[in-house]
Image (cartoon, rainbow, N blue to C red):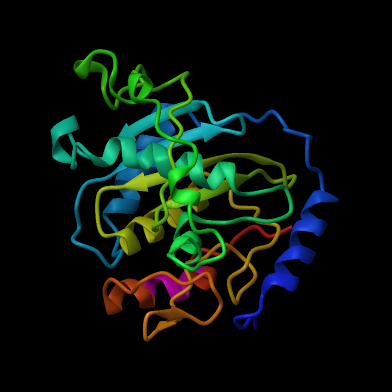
Amino acid sequence: MFGRNWTGWMTGMLAAAALSGVGTAAEAALPDHETVRSHLKKVVETPNGGFGLQMWATIVDRDGVVQVVAFSGEDRGDQWPGSRVISAQKANTANAFSLPGLALSTAQLFSAVQPGGSLYGLQHSNPVDTDAAYGGSASAIGTAKDPMVGKRVGGVNVFGGGLPLYDSSGNLVGAIGVSGDSSCADHNIAWKLRDALNLDYVPAGVSPTGDDNIVNDIEGGVSGSGWGHPVCADDAVKIANELPKTHPIGKK
């Protein structure tokens, strides 16, 4: 659909996005900690194509301020500790580089930021605020009072697991980041979690299905569309390819 000379198409998409509500920054009732945690626990129990590990999830609002940090296990040590901040980076990235009329997932940024890619260097922008990311009491990590809540953590992450959030009116209200397994499984879990939270009214995207699903079109190290993500495992790819059917977006 896109081919390698997608620059003109992307320019048109950005123009359309600019005409569809940039600067409206709608206020939204984002889900609370318990809602995110309960849905995350359920999604982790489903087949996602990874190692079946416990997960972290972070939600940021449209201003990039962390609203929720939750984990699926019984204790904060049941998930990879390093994935907590990665989940926040993914949420920040999906929010920072999506628009009211164009959704970009972190999975779709992998190829574009490689050397020679159209967005090379993006991964070094918007650095993490280390005080916001690592400050506060360890005992509060992953609870409703996680030390990152209320702060702009920042960061850019360019593999699967980050998705923008759109409400039922099509307003871009923030993003979700999920981390703790393979990057492909992270994407699948994030998609299912966004669906469960009813914040998946994606207006348009660069995938072959016109949304922000992961694109697996890398051959010989080159993505045919420019938005490709490496394949982690065959089962993860199969699950991802079926997501528009098993967990269809509420497309406007």
Q: Does the magenta run of residues contain 242?
A: yes
The single residue placed furthest to the left in the displayed view is 77
Badge count: 0
Relative to 60, is 204 on the left or the right? Answer: right
Residue placed farthest to the right in the image?
A: 19
Locate residue 148, reporting x and y percent.
38, 22
Residue interval drawn in magenta: 239-243
Rendered residue at 42%/21% (across/down): 149
At 28% from the left and 65% from the top, the residue drawn is: 47
Residue 108: image x %, image y %? 50, 63
Q: Residue at x 19, y 52 (%)?
A: 53
Q: Is residue 134 above or below residue 81?
A: above
Q: Main secondary structure of the magenta part?
A: helix
- Give whichever of 113, 64 is nearer the camera: 113
Magenta run includes residue 195 = no
Measured along the vertical axis of the image, is residue 236 above or below residue 56? below
232 or 225: nearer the eye? 225
Q: Quadrant of the C terminus?
A: bottom right
Q: Is residue 59 visible?
A: yes
Rendered location of residue 178, percent (x, y): 37, 46
- Judge left or right: residue 147 versus residue 213: left
Residue sticking out furthest to the top: 137
Which of the 4 quarters of the picture holds residue 144?
Answer: top left
User: Residue 203 is drawn in which quadrant?
Assistant: bottom right
Relative to 43, 205 lies left or right: right
Whether residue 75 is visible: no
Measured as percent of width and height from the top left, residue 51 is found at 18, 61
